[in-house]
Amino acid sequence: MKSYRQYCAVARALDVVGDRWVLLIVRELLALGPSRYTDLRRGLPGIATNLLADRLKAMEADGLIERYDAPPPVGTALFRLTERGRELRGVVAALTEWGLDRMPPGPEADDAVQPHWSALAGALLRPDHLAPDAEIVVEITSEGETLTLRLRHGTFDIRRGPAPHPDLTLTGPSMLVGGLLSGLLPATEAATQGLRITDPTHLLPTLLPSA
Protein backbone atom coordinates (compact mmCIF):
# COMPACT_ATOMS: atom_id res chain seq x y z
CA MET A 1 0.00 0.00 0.00
CA LYS A 2 1.22 3.47 -0.80
CA SER A 3 1.80 5.74 2.15
CA TYR A 4 -0.44 8.74 2.72
CA ARG A 5 2.77 10.64 3.49
CA GLN A 6 1.10 12.54 6.31
CA TYR A 7 2.68 13.17 9.70
CA CYS A 8 -0.47 12.10 11.56
CA ALA A 9 -1.06 9.07 13.77
CA VAL A 10 -4.31 8.20 11.96
CA ALA A 11 -2.62 8.34 8.57
CA ARG A 12 0.38 6.35 9.81
CA ALA A 13 -1.95 3.68 11.22
CA LEU A 14 -3.87 3.50 7.95
CA ASP A 15 -0.59 3.09 6.09
CA VAL A 16 -0.44 -0.29 7.85
CA VAL A 17 -4.06 -1.43 8.27
CA GLY A 18 -5.94 0.62 5.69
CA ASP A 19 -5.66 -1.84 2.83
CA ARG A 20 -8.74 -3.91 2.05
CA TRP A 21 -8.85 -7.26 3.89
CA VAL A 22 -6.14 -6.42 6.45
CA LEU A 23 -8.48 -5.85 9.40
CA LEU A 24 -10.58 -8.84 8.37
CA ILE A 25 -7.45 -11.02 8.49
CA VAL A 26 -6.88 -9.60 11.98
CA ARG A 27 -10.51 -10.48 12.78
CA GLU A 28 -9.94 -14.09 11.74
CA LEU A 29 -6.78 -14.45 13.84
CA LEU A 30 -8.45 -12.80 16.85
CA ALA A 31 -11.40 -15.15 16.50
CA LEU A 32 -9.71 -18.49 15.89
CA GLY A 33 -6.10 -17.96 16.92
CA PRO A 34 -3.19 -19.41 14.92
CA SER A 35 -4.53 -20.44 11.52
CA ARG A 36 -3.42 -22.20 8.38
CA TYR A 37 -3.56 -20.44 5.04
CA THR A 38 -6.56 -22.62 4.14
CA ASP A 39 -8.31 -21.62 7.38
CA LEU A 40 -7.92 -17.97 6.46
CA ARG A 41 -9.26 -18.60 2.96
CA ARG A 42 -12.28 -20.31 4.50
CA GLY A 43 -12.93 -17.35 6.81
CA LEU A 44 -12.46 -14.75 4.07
CA PRO A 45 -14.86 -15.72 1.29
CA GLY A 46 -14.32 -13.55 -1.76
CA ILE A 47 -10.59 -12.95 -1.40
CA ALA A 48 -8.37 -14.09 -4.27
CA THR A 49 -5.60 -16.47 -3.21
CA ASN A 50 -2.84 -14.25 -4.61
CA LEU A 51 -4.27 -11.21 -2.82
CA LEU A 52 -4.38 -13.10 0.49
CA ALA A 53 -0.75 -14.14 0.00
CA ASP A 54 0.22 -10.53 -0.71
CA ARG A 55 -1.63 -9.23 2.35
CA LEU A 56 -0.04 -11.83 4.62
CA LYS A 57 3.44 -10.92 3.37
CA ALA A 58 2.77 -7.22 3.94
CA MET A 59 1.33 -7.83 7.42
CA GLU A 60 4.34 -9.95 8.31
CA ALA A 61 6.69 -7.22 7.11
CA ASP A 62 4.76 -4.65 9.16
CA GLY A 63 5.07 -6.77 12.30
CA LEU A 64 1.36 -7.57 12.66
CA ILE A 65 1.61 -11.33 12.16
CA GLU A 66 4.24 -14.04 12.22
CA ARG A 67 4.49 -17.35 10.43
CA TYR A 68 5.76 -20.49 12.14
CA ASP A 69 5.84 -24.22 11.50
CA ALA A 70 3.35 -26.15 13.60
CA PRO A 71 4.54 -29.40 15.19
CA PRO A 72 3.03 -32.76 14.11
CA PRO A 73 0.34 -33.80 13.48
CA VAL A 74 -0.51 -30.39 11.95
CA GLY A 75 2.85 -30.16 10.18
CA THR A 76 2.14 -27.01 8.21
CA ALA A 77 2.78 -23.28 8.47
CA LEU A 78 0.52 -21.31 10.77
CA PHE A 79 -0.07 -17.58 11.02
CA ARG A 80 -0.64 -15.79 14.33
CA LEU A 81 -0.86 -12.23 15.55
CA THR A 82 2.20 -10.69 17.12
CA GLU A 83 1.88 -8.59 20.26
CA ARG A 84 1.63 -5.55 17.98
CA GLY A 85 -1.10 -7.25 15.98
CA ARG A 86 -3.05 -8.18 19.10
CA GLU A 87 -3.14 -4.51 20.04
CA LEU A 88 -5.64 -4.13 17.19
CA ARG A 89 -8.24 -5.98 19.27
CA GLY A 90 -9.54 -2.65 20.55
CA VAL A 91 -9.83 -1.33 16.99
CA VAL A 92 -11.81 -4.40 15.90
CA ALA A 93 -14.02 -4.15 19.01
CA ALA A 94 -14.74 -0.49 18.30
CA LEU A 95 -15.64 -1.28 14.69
CA THR A 96 -17.87 -4.13 15.90
CA GLU A 97 -19.77 -1.82 18.22
CA TRP A 98 -19.94 0.97 15.64
CA GLY A 99 -21.30 -1.40 12.99
CA LEU A 100 -24.02 -2.97 15.13
CA ASP A 101 -26.74 -0.65 13.87
CA ARG A 102 -26.24 -2.09 10.38
CA MET A 103 -26.95 -5.65 11.53
CA PRO A 104 -30.66 -5.83 12.53
CA PRO A 105 -32.06 -6.18 8.98
CA GLY A 106 -30.18 -9.47 8.68
CA PRO A 107 -27.93 -10.77 5.90
CA GLU A 108 -28.58 -10.03 2.26
CA ALA A 109 -29.14 -12.99 -0.03
CA ASP A 110 -25.54 -12.91 -1.27
CA ASP A 111 -23.90 -12.20 2.11
CA ALA A 112 -21.51 -14.78 3.53
CA VAL A 113 -22.44 -15.87 7.05
CA GLN A 114 -20.05 -17.64 9.42
CA PRO A 115 -20.86 -18.40 13.06
CA HIS A 116 -17.43 -17.51 14.44
CA TRP A 117 -18.05 -13.89 13.42
CA SER A 118 -21.05 -13.78 15.75
CA ALA A 119 -19.09 -15.52 18.50
CA LEU A 120 -16.26 -12.99 18.16
CA ALA A 121 -18.69 -10.05 18.31
CA GLY A 122 -20.19 -11.44 21.50
CA ALA A 123 -16.75 -12.01 23.03
CA LEU A 124 -15.53 -8.51 22.17
CA LEU A 125 -18.64 -6.73 23.42
CA ARG A 126 -19.37 -8.69 26.59
CA PRO A 127 -18.92 -7.02 29.98
CA ASP A 128 -15.50 -7.87 31.41
CA HIS A 129 -16.42 -8.63 34.98
CA LEU A 130 -15.71 -12.34 35.30
CA ALA A 131 -13.67 -13.33 38.32
CA PRO A 132 -9.96 -13.90 37.57
CA ASP A 133 -10.33 -17.68 37.92
CA ALA A 134 -13.75 -17.98 36.24
CA GLU A 135 -14.40 -19.63 32.88
CA ILE A 136 -17.68 -19.89 31.00
CA VAL A 137 -17.93 -22.33 28.11
CA VAL A 138 -20.51 -21.56 25.42
CA GLU A 139 -21.30 -24.05 22.68
CA ILE A 140 -22.74 -22.47 19.52
CA THR A 141 -24.31 -24.50 16.74
CA SER A 142 -25.19 -22.39 13.72
CA GLU A 143 -25.11 -22.60 9.93
CA GLY A 144 -24.24 -26.30 10.08
CA GLU A 145 -21.17 -25.74 12.28
CA THR A 146 -20.48 -26.11 16.00
CA LEU A 147 -18.08 -23.81 17.88
CA THR A 148 -16.80 -23.65 21.43
CA LEU A 149 -16.40 -20.18 22.94
CA ARG A 150 -14.44 -20.04 26.21
CA LEU A 151 -14.74 -16.79 28.12
CA ARG A 152 -12.31 -15.83 30.85
CA HIS A 153 -11.43 -12.62 32.65
CA GLY A 154 -10.01 -10.29 30.01
CA THR A 155 -9.65 -12.94 27.33
CA PHE A 156 -11.43 -15.58 25.26
CA ASP A 157 -10.82 -18.25 22.67
CA ILE A 158 -12.98 -19.75 19.97
CA ARG A 159 -12.45 -23.20 18.51
CA ARG A 160 -14.31 -25.20 15.92
CA GLY A 161 -16.00 -28.29 17.36
CA PRO A 162 -18.30 -29.10 20.29
CA ALA A 163 -17.55 -28.54 23.96
CA PRO A 164 -17.41 -31.59 26.26
CA HIS A 165 -19.34 -29.89 29.07
CA PRO A 166 -20.72 -26.50 28.01
CA ASP A 167 -22.22 -24.15 30.57
CA LEU A 168 -24.48 -22.60 27.95
CA THR A 169 -25.59 -23.75 24.49
CA LEU A 170 -27.01 -21.64 21.68
CA THR A 171 -28.49 -23.29 18.60
CA GLY A 172 -29.90 -21.36 15.66
CA PRO A 173 -29.12 -18.85 12.90
CA SER A 174 -25.99 -16.71 13.27
CA MET A 175 -28.12 -13.57 13.07
CA LEU A 176 -29.89 -14.59 16.28
CA VAL A 177 -26.72 -15.76 18.01
CA GLY A 178 -24.98 -12.49 17.19
CA GLY A 179 -28.01 -10.41 18.12
CA LEU A 180 -28.22 -12.09 21.50
CA LEU A 181 -24.52 -11.99 22.38
CA SER A 182 -24.12 -8.39 21.21
CA GLY A 183 -27.06 -7.21 23.32
CA LEU A 184 -29.17 -6.17 20.33
CA LEU A 185 -31.73 -8.91 20.85
CA PRO A 186 -33.28 -9.85 24.22
CA ALA A 187 -33.16 -13.55 25.05
CA THR A 188 -36.95 -13.87 25.03
CA GLU A 189 -37.18 -12.35 21.54
CA ALA A 190 -34.29 -14.46 20.24
CA ALA A 191 -36.01 -17.59 21.54
CA THR A 192 -39.30 -16.52 19.95
CA GLN A 193 -37.52 -16.13 16.60
CA GLY A 194 -36.06 -19.62 16.80
CA LEU A 195 -32.86 -19.55 18.87
CA ARG A 196 -32.66 -22.53 21.22
CA ILE A 197 -31.01 -21.53 24.49
CA THR A 198 -29.95 -24.05 27.13
CA ASP A 199 -28.78 -22.22 30.25
CA PRO A 200 -29.24 -24.48 33.29
CA THR A 201 -27.29 -22.26 35.70
CA HIS A 202 -28.61 -18.90 34.39
CA LEU A 203 -25.24 -17.55 33.25
CA LEU A 204 -26.51 -15.75 30.13
CA PRO A 205 -27.40 -12.44 31.84
CA THR A 206 -23.81 -12.08 33.07
CA LEU A 207 -22.50 -12.24 29.48
CA LEU A 208 -24.71 -9.64 27.85
CA PRO A 209 -23.59 -6.04 27.34
CA SER A 210 -26.94 -4.77 28.57
CA ALA A 211 -26.85 -6.84 31.78
Image (cartoon, rainbow, N blue to C red):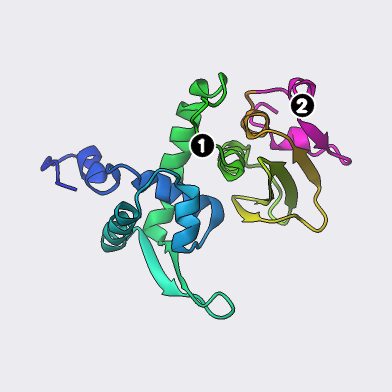
Q: Write down the region rendered in magenta.
A: 185-211
Q: Nearer the viewer, mark 2 or mark 1?
A: 1
Disc on res. 112: 1
Name which residue lies at 59% across and 38% down: 118
Q: Is residue 52 visible?
A: yes
At which x and y percent is residue 84?
Answer: 37, 57
Is residue 74 placed above or below 167 in the rendered structure? below
Q: Determine the CA span between mark 2 and mark 1.
A: 20 Å
Where does label 2 land, which residue?
194
Q: Say if 185 sits above or below 6 in the image.
A: above
Q: Quadrant of residue 72?
A: bottom right
Residue 164: x %, y % from top left: 81, 58
Few, some or many residues within 10 Å of mark 2 (<14, 14–19, 20+): few
- Can residue 88 be seen by looking at this rendering? no
Callout 2 amino acid? Gly
Secondary element at image label 1: loop
